[in-house]
Image (cartoon, helix red, strand yellow):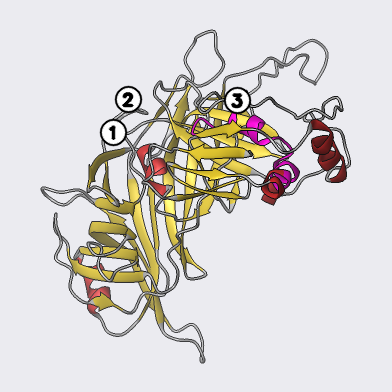
Amino acid sequence: MTLTLTFDHPEFPDGHEFDVGGILVENREEVEITEDQERMFVARRRQSVREAADGNQFMKVTGKTTVSTKDMNEILVETNTGPTDGEVEETDEPATEEVEEGDV
Amino acid sequence: MPAGLGGGGSLGLALETVMGTYIAPTVSVPILSEGVKYTEEKYYPRHIRQTTMPSDVKSGPYHVEGPIEMDVDPAFLPYFMYASRHLITKTGVGPFEYKFVPSNAGSASTAASGAVARTMSITVVRNDVVFGYSGCVVAGYEFTIEEGTLRVSLDILGMKEAVQSAPTEVWQAANLFGADAHRIYLAASAAAPTFGAVDINFNGFTFRSNFNSEPQNRIVADRSASYISFGETEAEVESELDFIDRTDYDNFVSNTTRAIKLESLNGGATFAAATSGVKIQGNRVSYDAYDPELEGMGDLIMADFSGRVVLPVGGDGYEIHIKSPATIT
């Protein structure tokens, strides 16, 4: 199981395409995020998909991340020369626990 | 944090429900540049105390101002027009057609919803640092065709600025109006002009409207602007025209007004048929200047034209129509 992203912008029609950190999602549709997409999202935005969802009221994320905190830190280190707020203590555990549908 | 590039920045906006109360962006808007800034008049007391240098500094009233330049995209332009000095009608079931005409409002709207003018919050991210501007209005705008593309420069005036949490930007495919999208029409001036054939003599097109807006700072325990006021509406059309005959010159001399319309359309040959479009129409335009000149031996004979928009009986001086996928409620 991977993360699933849904996007629901009330001011745009069904199927209107949005780009969320390099992930294409149609309005009021959901898209499964592949591990590669999730890694690229972290590299591009320097935050996890879940963290990004906190910054957009129309974005919801469910499911389980495929990028551990250790992986995430490695991506952040590899793609930046300086420390960031996104860096967290290294563990081999997934960055977040699995959540139920709609529990965001 | 290492130095950043402009391209890594972003601008987002949201229409406000309470004038001056910040709202996180609901749309991310692709722009060409921006210069929105905190603007303050500090007080430097010039006390006469055996010195020629101010002896202190006190914070003064402040407001927010600056330009935003962007290619016109019908997905975003309605938001900015809502945040200006307009009466608004919205029709259709998608795409939606918005019609904006200048209003006589004396100050920025305090409306919370509906097809009425509103204030907006603007969020600018510069090198990952977030600036939140609230109580913003579009105090004036200038539409031009540059590099074949319809572009707009928006003059922003706002009430306040504060640090805000980082937004998650969400982008859309661009829907621009390129060189094959534009048509200009002329007609006799009227409240609802009847336009005929396309005019082919315009070498450029500029439409600007200036609401002569000013920040108003009242004596309260808050240095930010209390509201934004509007003044006289000054709307103009400018272009350079091929000089073919005396028609326009005679209009200038005899004070004959004309109607001028720019249509920029995608997905159809008429505004009604187009899937998206912008129509900028001056219903009664006075020839403020029309100057044909012999500029040089090898130069085309052109005439610089500028026109001032005035009110026709029973109508509006100008109207801006936008056909957009966005539904603003």
* Kind of element beneath mark 3: loop
Please, which chain is the residue tagged with disc 1 on?
B
Q: Residue at x 24, y 47 (%)?
A: B93
Residue B197, given in percent of the width and then of the height, sits at 21, 77
Contact, mark 3 vs mark 1 (Cβ under 8 Å): no
Q: Nearer the viewer, mark 3 or mark 1?
A: 3
Residue at image point 14% right, 58% down: B190
Vertical side of B70 occupied by B301: above or below: below
For the question of whether residue B304 can be seen, the reply is no
Res. B8 mark: none
Q: CA distance from mark 1 to mark 2?
A: 7 Å
Instruction: Give the residue type that dot 2 points to.
Output: Ala
Q: Magenta span covers which residues?
A: A39-58
Tell me if mark 2 has few (under 14), some (14-19) or many (20+) residues whose alpha carbon lies within 10 angstroms of its own. Answer: some
Q: Which residue is mark 2?
A: B111
Closer mark to the observer between disc 3 and disc 2: 3
Q: Residues within 10 Å of mark 1 (few under 14, many from 20)?
A: many
Helix, strand or loop under label 1:
loop
Among the 4 quarters of the image, the one containing residue B212? top left
CA–CA distance in space, label 3 to label 2: 39 Å
Q: Residue under label 3, please give it.
A: A99
Residue A63 in view of the camera: yes
- Image quadrant in which the C terminus of chain B is located: top left
Chain letter of mark 2 equals B
Residue type at mark 1 is Val
